[in-house]
């Protein structure tokens, strides 16, 4: 029992001392702004360090009245009150173990810092080389021209003009879409396909299907089948126009369809989850880039009091990511850290890393 408890305490201390690897000076707090799930931060030999307990330990550090000393008091007080860490352990063995763990993570900290500095230098070098290459490409080029395009004063040389920036951006956007293999989004936040087009809001999806028949079609000749996540549409005697699994679930009882002018089938699908954008109508369709969806502000008024704040938060976070700015959750965590720094001016944060 003693060995088992000692092993548990040892594992806990490995995670605890990752936050205090530089002892009391400097005290570094690392915040990861990406991938909030419990993921591996780094490895050193058989030691695997994760950020699983960061939120809990940050709360302890924030509440500690005496800075790092108070933080350590809270940890070792827990070991004294809730475990047999001291009562069933040799004093020298405990001190030796703590010193070993502290040295191990200090070494890990130094190695990690070296890697960060090396990566930073490599990044700066790449940026410098790109700038030099760009400057070479942008240098004016002199070319000879024929007599009939030279001014009346005589022969001369002309400077090649740089391409229009707007044309370049448009070309880059087209290339990006081609590289991603995604369809261009239409004005209704959907897509225009060969046999039909579809648009969407957060609540519903509208599908427009031309019959493409030489003669007018009657409603009784149209077959439409709705289910929770399947749609089938066709004309009697013809192959189905749509027959596949939908991108998301719908509410079949709230879905409707109509035949407009005997030439156009219009479907209205009520989304089951009214908080997300569809990237395609059925799973066999090519996708659109939902990051380019532009929701109508007027539609937000149609949402209930619980859904609207979530949708607004989602839209805000999406805009922040596009601009390379922190999301609302990241900003909250930054504010917590800022408050902690203000409450503990005795700590040195000059070398703190914020990722």
Image (cartoon, helix red, strand yellow):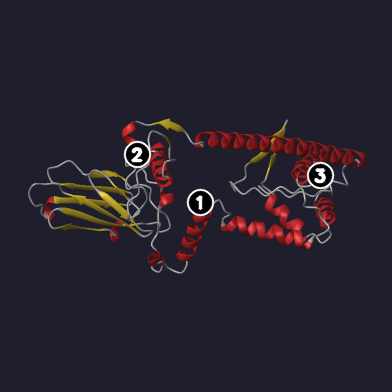
Tell me if mark 2 has few (under 14), some (14-19) or many (20+) residues whose alpha carbon lies within 10 angstroms of its own: few
Secondary structure at numbered mark 1:
helix
Q: Which of marks 2 and 3 is nearer the N terminus?
A: 3
The image shows residue 8, relative to residue 312, as above or below, that is above
Residue in front for this viewpoint, 90 or 134: 134
Picture coordinates of residue 181 (x, y %)?
Answer: 38, 38
Closer to us: mark 3 or mark 1?
1
Residue picked out by circle 3? 22
Q: Which residue is drawn at 73% across and 37% down?
A: 112
Which element is circle 2 on?
loop
Residue at disc 3, secondary structure: loop
The span from disc 3 to disc 1 (Cα, nearest Å) is: 36 Å
Residue 30: x %, y % from top left: 70, 48
Query: Which residue is disc 1 drawn over?
Result: 322
Camera-near label (2 vs 3) is 2
Q: Distance between the residues labelled 2 and 1?
A: 52 Å
State the image coordinates of residue 121 (x, y, percent, origin top left).
68, 36
């Amino acid at each position: 029992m003693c060995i088992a408890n000692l092993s548990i305490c040892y594992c806990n201390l490995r995670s605890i001392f990752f936050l205090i690897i530089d002892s009391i000076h400097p005290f570094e707090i690392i915040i990861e702004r990406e991938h909030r799930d419990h993921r591996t931060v780094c490895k050193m030999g058989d030691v695997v360090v994760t950020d699983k307990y960061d939120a809990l330990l940050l709360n302890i550090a924030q509440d500690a009245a005496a800075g790092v000393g108070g933080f350590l008091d809270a940890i070792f007080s827990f070991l004294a009150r809730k475990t047999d860490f001291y009562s069933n352990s040799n004093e020298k063995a405990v001190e030796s173990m703590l010193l070993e763990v502290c040295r191990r993570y200090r070494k890990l900290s130094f190695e990690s810092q070296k890697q960060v500095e090396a990566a930073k230098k490599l990044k700066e070098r790449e940026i410098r080389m790109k700038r030099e290459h760009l400057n070479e490409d942008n240098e004016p080029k002199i070319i000879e021209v024929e007599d009939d395009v030279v001014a009346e004063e005589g022969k001369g040389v002309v400077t090649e003009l740089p391409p229009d920036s707007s044309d370049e951006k448009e070309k880059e956007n087209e290339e990006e879409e081609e590289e991603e293999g995604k369809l261009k989004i239409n004005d209704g936040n959907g897509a225009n396909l060969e046999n039909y087009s579809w648009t969407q809001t957060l609540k519903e999806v509208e599908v427009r299907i031309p019959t493409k028949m030489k003669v007018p079609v009657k409603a009784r000749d149209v077959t439409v089948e709705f289910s929770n996540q399947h749609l089938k549409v066709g004309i009697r005697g013809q192959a189905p126009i749509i027959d596949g699994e939908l991108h998301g679930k719908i509410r079949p009882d709230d879905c409707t369809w109509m035949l407009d002018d005997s030439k156009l089938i219009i479907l209205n699908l009520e989304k089951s989850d009214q908080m997300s954008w569809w990237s395609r109508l059925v799973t066999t369709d090519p996708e659109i880039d939902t990051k380019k969806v532009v929701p109508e502000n007027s539609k937000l008024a149609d949402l209930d009091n619980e859904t609207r704040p979530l949708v607004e938060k989602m839209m805000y976070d999406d805009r922040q990511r596009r601009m390379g700015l922190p999301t609302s959750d990241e900003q909250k965590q930054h504010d917590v850290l800022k408050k902690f720094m203000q409450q503990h001016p005795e700590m040195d944060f000059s070398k703190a890393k914020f990722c």
